[in-house]
Image (tube, grey):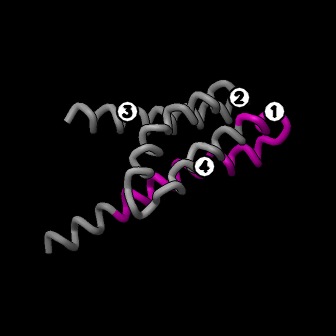
């Protein structure tokens, strides 16, 4: 239970830091968001379906930190990869659980 709470706190913190980093044009917040994305990344590495592809998840956030001063639209696109992935993953999990219960 505690691990789950910490996992979701890190995931939601990463999403919030991404939004704040892009809106304030603060690269440090985007780099910190990439660090907070690591628990999900490590979870995905342990899952055989994602393997090493999970390690690529925080890279767009770090790249957003590099380009946020020069191009905010590009930073928005790069920073939105992680939240979109989390929403997609949760949708798949919820639908899978709904189908298993039926």
Residue 70's quadrant in the figure?
A: top right
Marks 4 and 1, the one that precedes in the sequence:
1
Q: Position of residue 5 (x, y in %)?
A: 28, 34
How far separated are the C-alphas under marks 2 and 3? Answer: 21 Å
Residue 19's quadrant in the figure?
A: top right
Of helix, strand and loop, which one carries label 1? loop
Q: Could you tell me if the residues under marks 4 and 2 are in contact, i.e. CB atoms within 8 Å?
A: no
How far separated are the C-alphas under marks 4 and 1? Answer: 17 Å
**Which residue lies under the disc numbered 3?**
9
Q: Could you tell me if the residues under marks 2 and 1 are in contact, i.e. CB atoms within 8 Å?
A: yes
Residue density around tag 1, few if under 14, some if 14–19, many if 20 or more, within 10 Å: some
How far separated are the C-alphas under marks 4 and 2? Answer: 15 Å
Marks 4 and 3, the one that precedes in the sequence:
3
**Which residue lies under the disc numbered 2?**
27
Residue 19 is left or right of residue 40, and the answer is: right
Marks 4 and 2, the one that precedes in the sequence:
2
How far separated are the C-alphas under marks 2 and 1? Answer: 8 Å
Of helix, strand and loop, which one carries label 3? helix
Seen at 52% across and 54% down, the residue is 52
Q: Position of residue 74 (x, y in %)?
A: 76, 48
Magenta range is 65-92
Residue 7's quadrant in the figure?
A: top left
**Which residue lies under the disc numbered 4?**
80
Marks 2 and 1, the one that precedes in the sequence:
2
For the residue pair 4 and 53, the one nearer the viewer reads as 53
Q: In this view, which residue lies farthest toward the right?
A: 70
Of helix, strand and loop, which one carries label 2? helix
Q: Main secondary structure of the magenta part?
A: helix
Residue 11 is left or right of residue 77, and the answer is: left
Q: Is residue 81 above or below residue 32?
A: below
**Which residue lies under the disc numbered 1?**
69
Q: Position of residue 42 (x, y in %)?
A: 43, 43
């Amino acid at each position: 239970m505690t691990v789950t709470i910490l996992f979701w706190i890190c995931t939601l913190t990463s999403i919030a830091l991404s939004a704040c980093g892009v809106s304030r044009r603060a690269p440090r917040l985007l780099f910190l968001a990439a660090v907070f994305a690591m628990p999900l990344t490590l979870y995905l590495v342990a899952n055989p379906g994602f393997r090493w592809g999970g390690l690529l998840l925080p890279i767009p956030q770090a790249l957003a930190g590099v380009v946020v001063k020069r191009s905010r639209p590009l930073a928005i696109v790069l920073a939105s990869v992680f939240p979109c992935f989390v929403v997609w993953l949760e949708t798949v999990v919820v639908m899978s659980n709904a189908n298993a219960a039926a």
